[in-house]
Image (cartoon, rainbow, N blue to C red):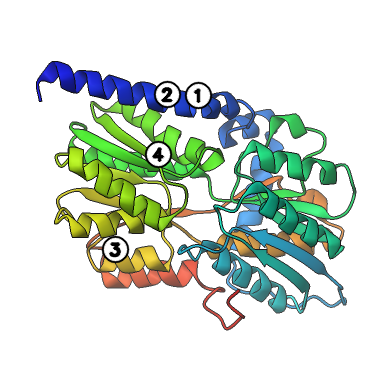
């Protein structure tokens, strides 16, 4: 292929990506970044630091008073990633240390579930008459599901896996946003790949469906690369959080681009699907691949040498933060809580020492490895 043709293809792909992400660019202004939020509300940073000190405690004492607590949880937990299942277990186990046995109604759905199915799960969760309702937000359609509930005093809404408050909700924000800052994780991976490649060459991107994750994990990564390196993105696919679709998309892109230096994957399921395709084509180890989140399936892939790097969430921090936040609120100390809780990340690379990996796992899964029902 001559250089003029190659440049034309790259320009077409970039134009397609720009068109597909333009909604993400527009929607980005709907959210506060963490830095912008702390500038607008400087007291929130101190509240976050205070709660983070509490969350890092590996145990708490039982509280003296009896508390009745009903919680409804709607999670996209039907996927390979164990993030959501571990979140549930860490939440329940932390509450147990406080001496609280909540009545929990959990509704686990696929991340690719159609809107009607998600709305039905949310409706069923509301019907349990919970004190607190835990949901996530990945697109404008989720915002529309949540908004009618925000004007009520009950249930209190906790939005998980999002740490960027919605500007339009100022004055009627949910009880808490809890998770890990996707933009920060994307930048950590971008810095890794920039160093690993010397900042030159070509790469491909596998995105989830349109929405918050693609914007925060995907667009943030691409923008960082454009600003700080000479790397060229030559192919991009939207696979959804679907291992099989990611596998097929990777086979498709590898038919055209065998000289790329890495594939940037935006979720666990996407990464594991890409790894299967790299194995099948004999390119595993020649083309780098990352994970996103550092749950057990990813750490096992890193240990086997199949995954080059992942950004590891100290997973149980988010379930613990939910439990600690609810307890403080029930004790009448809700004014101490930040609106946003954002947990810790660690970069885990292939070849990590076994002792170091075991230490990170013990920190990350300190509650979720305990024996609570794995829903």
State the image coordinates of residue 322 (x, y, percent, origin top left). Answer: 68, 60
Tell me the CA gap for discs 2 and 4: 19 Å
Q: What separation in Å lies between label 1 and label 2 (alpha carbons)?
A: 6 Å
Q: Earlier in the sequence, mark 2 or mark 4?
A: 2
In contact (CB < 8 Å): disc 3 and disc 4: no
1 and 3 marks in contact (CB < 8 Å): no
Q: Earlier in the sequence, mark 1 or mark 3?
A: 1
Please, is residue 37 above or below residue 295 in the view?
A: above
Secondary structure state at the residue bearing disc 1: helix
Q: Which residue is at a point 56% across and 68% down the rendered structure image?
A: 85
Picture coordinates of residue 331, whole percent (x, y): 85, 63
- Residue drawn 32% across the image and 51% down it: 248
Numbered mark located on residue 22 in the image = 1
Q: CA distance from mark 3 to mark 4?
A: 20 Å
For residue 187, the mark is 4
Q: Which residue is mark 2?
A: 18
Q: Which of the two discs, 3 and 4, labels the residue nearer the N terminus?
A: 4
Q: Secondary structure at mark 2?
A: helix
How many angstroms separate mark 3 from mark 2 (CA)?
A: 32 Å
Counting residues from the N terminus, which is met first, the one under dot 3 or under dot 2? 2
Query: Which residue is painted at 15% across and 42% down in the image?
Result: 258
In front: label 3 or label 2: 2
Contact (Cβ within 8 Å) of mark 1 with mark 2: yes
Tell me if mark 2 has few (under 14), some (14-19) or many (20+) residues whose alpha carbon lies within 10 angstroms of its own: some
The residue tagged 3 is: 302
Residue in the foreground of this view, choosing between 213 and 91: 213
Image quarter of residue 151 = top right
């Amino acid at each position: 292929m001559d250089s003029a043709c190659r440049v034309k293809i790259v320009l077409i792909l970039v134009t397609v990506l720009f068109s597909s992400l333009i909604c993400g660019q527009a929607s980005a202004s709907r959210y506060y970044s963490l830095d912008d939020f702390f500038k607008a509300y400087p007291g929130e940073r101190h509240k976050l630091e205070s709660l983070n000190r509490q969350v890092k405690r590996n145990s708490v004492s039982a509280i003296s008073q009896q508390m009745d607590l009903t919680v409804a949880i709607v999670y996209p937990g039907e996927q390979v990633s164990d993030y959501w299942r571990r979140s549930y277990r860490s939440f329940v186990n932390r509450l147990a240390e406080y001496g609280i046995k909540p009545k929990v109604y959990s509704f686990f759905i696929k991340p690719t579930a159609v809107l009607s199915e998600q709305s039905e799960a949310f409706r069923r969760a509301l019907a349990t008459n919970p004190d607190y309702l835990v949901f996530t937000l990945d697109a404008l359609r989720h915002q529309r599901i949540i908004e009618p509930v925000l004007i009520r005093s009950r249930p209190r809404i906790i939005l998980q896996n999002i740490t960027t408050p919605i500007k339009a909700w100022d004055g009627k924000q949910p009880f808490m946003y809890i998770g890990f800052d996707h933009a920060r994780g994307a930048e950590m991976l971008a810095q890794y790949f920039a160093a690993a490649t010397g900042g030159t060459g070509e790469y491909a991107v596998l995105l989830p469906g349109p929405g918050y994750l693609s914007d925060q994990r995907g667009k943030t990564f691409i923008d960082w690369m454009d600003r700080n390196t000479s790397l060229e993105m030559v192919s991009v696919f939207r696979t959804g959080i679907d291992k099989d679709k990611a596998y097929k998309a990777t086979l498709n892109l590898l038919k055209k681009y065998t000289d790329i230096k890495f594939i940037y994957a935006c979720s666990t399921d996407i990464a594991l699907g890409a790894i299967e395709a790299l194995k099948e084509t004999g390119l595993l180890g020649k083309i780098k691949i990352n994970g996103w989140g550092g749950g057990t399936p990813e750490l096992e892939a890193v240990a086997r040498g199949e995954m080059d790097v992942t950004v590891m969430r100290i997973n149980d921090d988010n379930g613990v933060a939910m439990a600690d936040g609810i307890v403080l609120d029930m004790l009448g100390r809700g004014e101490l809580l930040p609106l946003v809780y954002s947990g810790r990340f660690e970069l885990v690379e292939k070849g990590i020492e076994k002792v170091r990996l075991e230490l990170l796992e013990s920190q990350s899964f300190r509650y979720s490895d305990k024996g609570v029902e794995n829903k």
